[in-house]
Amino acid sequence: MKKLLAIVVFILTLVGCANQTLEEDKEIETPKVEEKDQDLDEEEKIAETPQFDEVSFDMLIPDGSTAMALTHFKSTMPNLGDHVKYTISSYTEGSDALADAFTSETSQVIVAPTNLGATLYQQGVPYQLVASLVWGDLYLISQESLNFDDLAGKKITTFGEGSTPDIVLQCILKEKGLLDSVEIEYLPSVADVQARFASGETEIAVIAEPSLSVLKTTMDHVNVVMDFQEQWRELYGGNSYPQVSLFVHKDLIENHQEVIEPLLAQIDASISFANESTEEMANEAIQIGFEMPENSIIESIPQSNLMFKTAENACVEVDSYLKKLYEFNPETVGGSLPNEDFYYFVN
């Protein structure tokens, strides 16, 4: 009997050990199954993530208010996607360098006067307007107290013959009946006008921000005769005129559409930063090479009318602006008004 009992106990012990071994094997094997499932999940996630071809492009920005609008963008160089590389060319002065960039297609993203983009569009350059950024930064100034009625018989010095400052000046003078009673003198750039006015050689001039704010800090008598933006609103209504817009090459739009939305978002953020964190923006501007007093940059922002509007939101005002220029002189917009393909609406 004792021998039988011993045999039963021995058998039960063996069964218990076997069961324990099986349970331990199950515990060891279970994580391996989970690990395999996790690996599959990661592979599925990678497969679902859009894979884009690498893209690189250059961006061209004019000097002045536009440069200030995009100071934060240039200072931080935000990421537009892991597959995206871009450069920002040195700031340009005058419309000739911008026109050359359009025709040579050396920069795929160009910030330029709206009517220049429209004019070159008529000539077949493959760029579309995707947003408008500056809504007028032009002023008529004098070294003595004058009003509008005092301009008859005077000489007005402006810059960029045939470009936005000249066109807007002539449009307003024509509406006021003064175009034929003033002499208009042209200089190549706003910097030339600023220097001439500061030296006293020019008594009445068209100036743009931030040059106006610089003059105010260095001269005792800078009288603003006319705010072009106020005059435009009074004459034609609307928000003012879309002086400067953002143009993007069709190749970038058609083959790398995923870049456009983050690009616009960062430009919008840069303009908001300039308007809302002006002192910080001015400090960034000095850090990246702006050669003007920091307080002049700060003072100029409210008068620069920086505002981001996508093409979809700005197209009615752009159309109205270009139509007014066309009525004044068709050549100011390239001989005819652009069609709908001139604009790119983000999906």
Image (tube, rainbow, N blue to C red):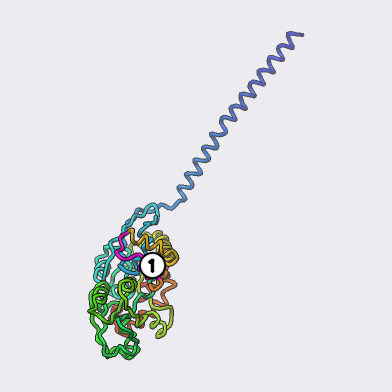
Q: Secondary structure at mark 1?
A: helix
Q: Which residue is mark 1?
A: 298
Q: In the visual, does 87 lie left or right of 81?
A: left
Q: Which residues are magenta?
A: 288-301
Residue placed at 33% from the left, 74% from the top? 216
Q: Name the image quarter holding residue 221.
A: bottom left
Most extreme residue toward the right is 1
Q: Name the image quarter holding residue 235.
A: bottom left
Q: How many marks?
A: 1
Residue 249 can be seen, yes or no: no
Q: Is residue 207 above or below residue 178?
A: above
Most extreme residue toward the front is 220
Q: Name the image quarter holding residue 295.
A: bottom left
Residue placed at 36% from the left, 80% from the top? 228
Q: Is residue 108 above or below residue 240?
A: above
- At which x and y percent is residue 272? 43, 65
Residue 295 belongs to the span the image colors magenta: yes
Residue type indicated by callout 1: Ile
Q: Is residue 179 above or below residue 105?
A: below
Which is more toward the observer, 181 or 124?
181
Q: Quadrant of the N terminus?
A: top right
Residue 212 belongs to the span the image colors magenta: no
- At which x and y percent is residue 93? 26, 69
- At which x and y percent is residue 68? 36, 66
Q: Quadrant of the C terminus?
A: bottom left
